[in-house]
Image (cartoon, rainbow, N blue to C red):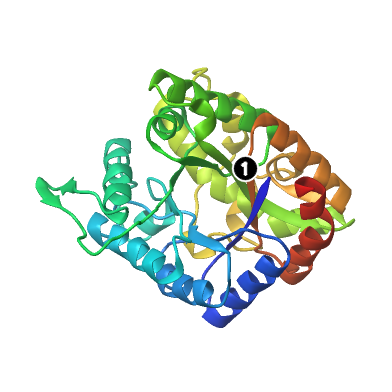
Amino acid sequence: MDFGLVLQTDPPASAVVGLMRRAERNGFRYGWTFDSAVLWQEPFVIHSRILDHTERLIVGPMVTNPGTRAWEVTASTFATLNEMYGNRTVCGIGRGDSAMRVAGRGPNTLAALGEAIDVIRDLAEGRQATVEGRPLRLPWVKDGRLPVWMGAYGPRALALAGRKADGVILQLADPYLTGWMIRAVREAAAEAGRDPGSVTVCVAAPGYVGDDLDHAREQCRWFGGMVGNHVADLVARYGEHSGAVPEALTSYIARRTGYDYSHHGRVGNPDTGFVTDEIVDRFCLLGPAAAHIEKLRTLRDLGVDQFALYDMHDAREATIDAYGSEIIPALTR
């Protein structure tokens, strides 16, 4: 199992770079950041600094989207970083939540997302692609490599990831729901004539190492609110009791009343009163190192290839170090 670190690009950027360096020293192989240009600093500028100050770390957004940048610009950005630092990027991409909604736009359609996956990958790897009816190619790209991993929750999105993406990002660590999502991706991949095992599976969720569960839950409760935005979209599309999406995912937002993106991904988010302790425990990794190891082994046995640790709480350095000293060695030896 691989491990990634996920951060928001809050100023100062030097702190983000420092935490990514610390992560690499502790055995993390991936460094991810949010991508929401209004709420946080521009990630790709900071990615270049992270790559310059690390040796092996693979860097990418979790996640970008097809709507905030022209597709050829996104491809050129990745290709430039890869040319400079040796194919050490990965493109995490989704329909767009905070980045789009804060700017007054709705999330992109799955059709646009599917087309963008192909175009961005082709351009970044030096192949010709059609953008708005016009054939384009980046002539300076040589030996480019850009895996594209898609964030997904619902049946249609999971199927699209199985058909097109190199990897899928599942933003919760509930084993039951993770198993359901992996099966959906693999079935779609097989139906498309792909090797189901070729789609990398990444689970992304907060982790907090320690014995004080009450404190850990309060530090990670924001995550249930963030996931709730996506679940609300699913309920609006499929209905709460349609059977298309497990009620283990949809039922917990029954008391959700709204969401203020000014608190997005923040400890103490006031829009998380509907998130119960049970949901925090299911969606996150909490408790002593042994509890993290046990849950990660369960996820690994389900087919998870990477755990990406959301490190947004009051113990960022300590969590990175605990993963490096106890948890990563137990899952990689």
14 relative position to 40: left or right: right
Q: How many marks?
A: 1
x, y percentage for residue 213?
84, 53
Height in image: 76 above or below 226?
below
Q: Residue furthest left?
A: 134
Which residue lies at the image location 78% right of the left edge and 66% below the top edge? 321
Q: Nearer the viewer, residue 207 or 248?
A: 207
Height in image: 117 above or below 75?
above
Q: Is residue 71 visible?
A: yes
Q: Nearer the viewer, residue 83 or 153?
A: 83
For the N terminus, give its image quadrant: top right
For label 1, the SS is loop
Quadrant of res 270: bottom right
2 relative position to 43: left or right: right
164 relative position to 172: left or right: left
Q: Is residue 38 visible?
A: no
Quadrant of res 64: bottom left
x, y percentage for residue 250?
56, 31
x, y percentage for residue 232?
48, 38
Q: Residue furthest front?
A: 143
x, y percentage for residue 76?
29, 63
Which residue lies at the image location 45% right of the left edge and 65% below the top edge? 86
312 relative position to 85: left or right: right
Please state which amino acid type lies under the numbered disc 1.
Answer: Leu
Which residue lies at the image location 75% right of the left edge and 42% below the top edge? 296
Mark 1 sits on what residue? 172
